[in-house]
Image (tube, rainbow, N blue to C red):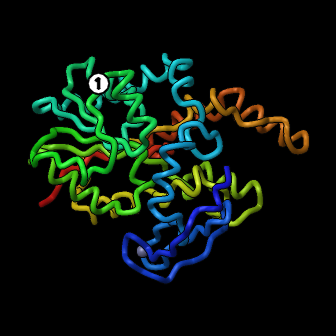
Amino acid sequence: MDWSGFPRESVNCMLCGGSEAEHLSVQRSWPVARCRNCGLIYLSCRPVEAALEEMYSREYYESTDVGYGGYVDNFKKYNKIFTRLFNRRADDIEPYRGRSRLLEVGCAHGFLLNHLQDRNWHVKGLEVSKLAAKYATDQLGLDVFCGKLEDARYESDSFDVVLLLDVLEHLHRPFETLKEIGRVLSPEGVLVVQCPWELTHWEERAEAFLKKMKPCTITPDAIPAHLYFFGPDTLEAFMEKGGFLTFKKQSGNYGAIRRKIKPVPVNTGPFYERWARFLYFRMGLQRMLYRLAAMIGKGNGLIRYARFDQ
Ligand SMILES: [Zn+2]
C-alpha cells in the first residue's frame, strides 16, 4: 500500500491555530512538525479527510504497516489477552454506569462492545469503516451506525458513558466530534479517551538517543492515519478545547498484543546491540519497565476520564 499517494492539505496547529511550527521529520512523505506556540506535534501536511475515510473502509484493518493487520484473526488467536484487557476496561468504567447506556465512537469490529454487552451495558457503536461496521452488525448482532457521529443524530442525553479509544488522533475535525459527544452525553456522563503517548514518551526519546537522532524524529505509529502525536499536556489541552475537563487520569501500556503480533526483531546491528535488544524485548526487561512506568503515570497509553463543561 502506498501511503504517500493521498490528496493532501496543509494545516495550522489544530490546538492553538498557530502557523509557526518547527519541522521535525518527514515520514512516508508526510511532514511532522511541532507548534512553536503550544507544543502540539502534528502532521503539518496531511491526507484530506475523504481519502483517509476511504482507506479505513478498505485496507486499514488488513494492512500490517499502518493499520490493524488481520484484526479479526488476531482477536481470535489472542482472545485471552483481549478478554483480560476488556475486563479491565469494564471494571474501570463500572463507577460511571448511570443507566448503563454506552456508546463507543470508533468501535471497529465491535469486540469490546460485545464484551460490555455481556456485562449488562446497553451498547451502541459508531464506525466509519464499512467493513468493520458490517462485521459488528452481521456477525455480532450489534447496533452499530456506519458513519460519523454528527450523522447518527442521537438525541441529547442518550448515553452515560462514551468511549473514544484510539480515535482522537485520527480525527480531522476533533472539536466538532467532542462537542457532539458532549451533547449526547447525560449531564453526569463520562467520556473516556485513550490514545498513545507518542514521540515525547521516554521509550521513544531513548530510542532516538540510542540511534543518535534528534529528539522526536523517530518514526511514530501509523502515519498518515495518526494526525496528532499527543503527550499528557497536549491531550488534556485538546480535550479542554473540545469542552471536556479531565477529572481522572490513568496510565496504560500498549504492548501485550503488539509483542505477540509484531515482535521487534533482535537480530540486527552489532553484537552488543543484539544482546541489548534480546534482553530488552525478549527477556522481559521491556515488560518490567512498562509495568513500572504505568505505576508512576509514564506508560505509553494515555487514558483520561472527562466531563463536558457546558
Ligand atoms: Zn499550537
Instruction: Give above or below for 194 relative to 215.
Output: above
Residue at 34 percent of width and 60 percent of height: 174
Q: Can you give x and y, in whole percent of width and height, for residue 59 in the image? A: 57, 43
Q: Is residue 28 left or right of residue 139?
A: right
The residue pinned by badge 1 equals: 116
Q: Can you give x and y, in whole percent of width and height, for residue 229 in the image? A: 50, 58
Q: Is residue 195 left or right of residue 147?
A: right
Instruction: Give above or below for 9 relative to 141.
Output: below
Q: Nearer the viewer, residue 289 or 304?
A: 304
Residue 137 visible in image: yes
Assign a secondary structure to mark 1.
helix
Outermost residue toward the bottom in this view: 20
Question: Which class describes the residues within 10 Å of circle 1: few (<14), some (14-19), or many (20+)?
Answer: some
Outermost residue toward the right in this view: 270
Q: Quadrant of ligand 1?
A: bottom left
Residue at 44 percent of width and 61 percent of height: 49
In the rendered image, which quarter is residue 104 located in? top left
Q: Is residue 155 left or right of residue 262?
A: left
| Image label count | 1
Residue 249 visible in image: no
Residue at 53 percent of width and 54 percent of height: 225
Viewport quadrant of the C terminus? bottom left
In the image, the residue with mark 1 has its CB under 8 Å from the nearest atom of ligand 1 = no
Residue at 66 percent of width and 33 percent of height: 262
Q: Nearer the viewer, residue 184 or 257?
A: 184
In the rendered image, which quarter is residue 295 located in? top left
Q: Can you give x and y, in whole percent of width and height, for residue 101 in the image? A: 16, 33
Residue type, numbered disc 1: Leu
Q: Can you give x and y, in whole percent of width and height, for residue 145 in the image? A: 29, 39
Q: Nearer the viewer, residue 87 or 130?
A: 130
